[in-house]
Image: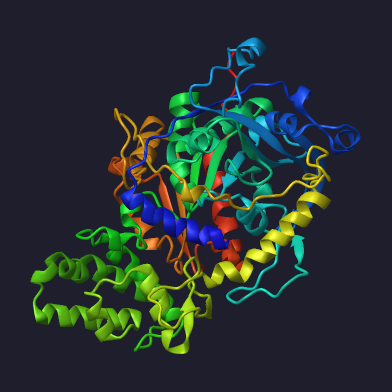
Amino acid sequence: MRKKQTGLKLAGLLATVSVLAAGAGVVVQPIALAEDTHQAADAAKQKVSVEDFLGKPQSVTSSGSVTVHGAHIDYEAVSGTLIVHKGGWDDSELPDADKDKDKKQPDAAASMYYVAYFKKGVRPENRPITFVYNGGPGSSSVWLHMGAFGPKRVVTADDTHTPAAPYAIVNNNDSLLDVSDLVFIDAPGTGYGRLIGKDKEKAFWGTDPDAGAFTDFIAQFLSRFGRYNSPKYLFGESYGTTRSAIVANKLADDKGIDLNGVILLSQIMNYDNDIDGVAMNPSIDQPYVLALPSYAATAWYHKRLPAEHPDLKAFLKEVEHFALTDYTAALQEGNAISDAQRDATAQKLHDYTGLPVDYIKKADLRINGGEFEKTLQGDKDLDTGRLDSRFSGPTMDKLSQFSYYDPQSSAMSSAYIAAFNDYARNTLHYGNSPAFGDGYQEYKFFSDAIMKWDFSHKQPNTDFPIHGAVNVLPDLASAMKHNPALKVMLNQGYYDLGTPYFEGIYEMKHLPISRDLSNNIQIVQYESGHMVYANEKSLTQLHDNVAKFITQTHGAPAPATK
């Protein structure tokens, strides 16, 4: 979680100025499932080289059960890896030992780790399947796996630091297994997956190659497990929403696979709206406007407002209106703003954020995310959380302009890391391969992809990539236009300063689609943060809303005709 927080902030900053080269897509290697399955008992008896282990798909199967809202569900869990290759790889070209003998390294490939849960006793073609992943970029899917929808969940404190181990791993009453099979996918270079071959990081660490890897992973998974005719969904969080927009379109264009739904959590699709990188983009004032309601919600939660507002939602509607009208008008004036308008705007911002009027004026009416987090409770020597602003933590440097860490990330990362390491080895029986010396393989919760990420993106129907702030709204719009039945669901937390909820609403309203297609979009807010599921009440609401969305959108198979 600590790197997740840093990664998202750096992504916003780097996306603003990125002029890196475009990445390529990737393709998959079709290998018969029966030939690549390594059960834990068999693996323990044989010496497997690291090269063979990483270069071939692996899988271990186990069984379990979960109780969801009173319903008992037996499931089969498959934990393993699939292999995807860099763009341009041709699966018709068989390896040539003589031709390749002088190569120091093989071509780049990614061994991508996943955990899949299949409900027992149901027909696969009638059973929805949802592909779930976090963001970063460079994060594993452990947060959604152990915090939201997997059959087991780690218990963490609601808005304070979770005490050190031992941590409680409990039955997840809000697992989505009641309505869908689940596949948790770790991004290339994370989890138990690894990158191998020549220029391996360049081949997968970028907006477009990452989306290509996930696209080909999903297509390969559907083929291997016979799920092409199942109702299909994507669930992405944070940068995972950026990824989902591209993948939804690529699945249809490149693979001929239409989705039933795309489920977004804590959206960021246009990085020009990023409140962390806005200071590097003078003359672009929109991020300040879109972040203001989240600032107001945070100040309301911490009781920093000068007046009482008993109804949070009514209060936020008032702030949203001010943000789009008077605040926007004031910012548009720039240096030409009158003293009277400047004073009135600063006073209103004080009323809605609790920040001192003088500080707001010194900031030229423009407070970025880091400044707000540092200043809101600065008189108490507390930094406010970024991913979940309900959290607070001791300031590292009283004189700094920004916080050096995210209190929410520090509050629960250890719990997730400990829980999954225990769960993977003792329940899924994965991570102890003889290929890795003493048998221990490290689960990588994060990679350092963000430091090397290529943010170039080639939008649909364009001839070249854009070297700058990523904007994938055209990708999601293209997917919706090609498949007018595609439904989209956006879930957001009021206390998210990383991807402010009003930003997501704004982006959904500005998708380049028709008014009729916009009716396919559903938006829901929760009294939680970036990781909505970190609050137990919000987790239950999230489960119920997503379960209803899936149930209402997968439909029944068409009747057979003579």
Total of numbered circles in the picture?
0
Q: Position of residue 205 (x, y in %)?
A: 49, 41
Q: Is residue 474 above or below residue 526?
A: above
Task: State whether residue 172 appears in this view.
Answer: no
Placement of the N terminus among the 4 image quadrants:
bottom right
| In this rendering, position of residue 517 left or right of residue 47 | left
Q: Position of residue 279 (x, y in %)?
A: 29, 63
Q: Is residue 271 above or below residue 364?
A: above
Colour pattern: rainbow
Residue at the (91%, 34%) spot, across then down: 45
| In this rendering, position of residue 325 left or right of residue 353 | left
Residue at the (23%, 83%) spot, across then down: 347
**Closer-to-camera residue (82/294):** 82
**Closer-to-camera residue (2/499):** 2
Placement of the C terminus among the 4 image quadrants:
top right
Q: Is residue 26 above or below residue 391?
A: above
Task: State whether residue 519 appears in this view.
Answer: yes
Residue reaching furthest to the right: 45
Q: Position of residue 240 (x, y in %)?
A: 50, 48
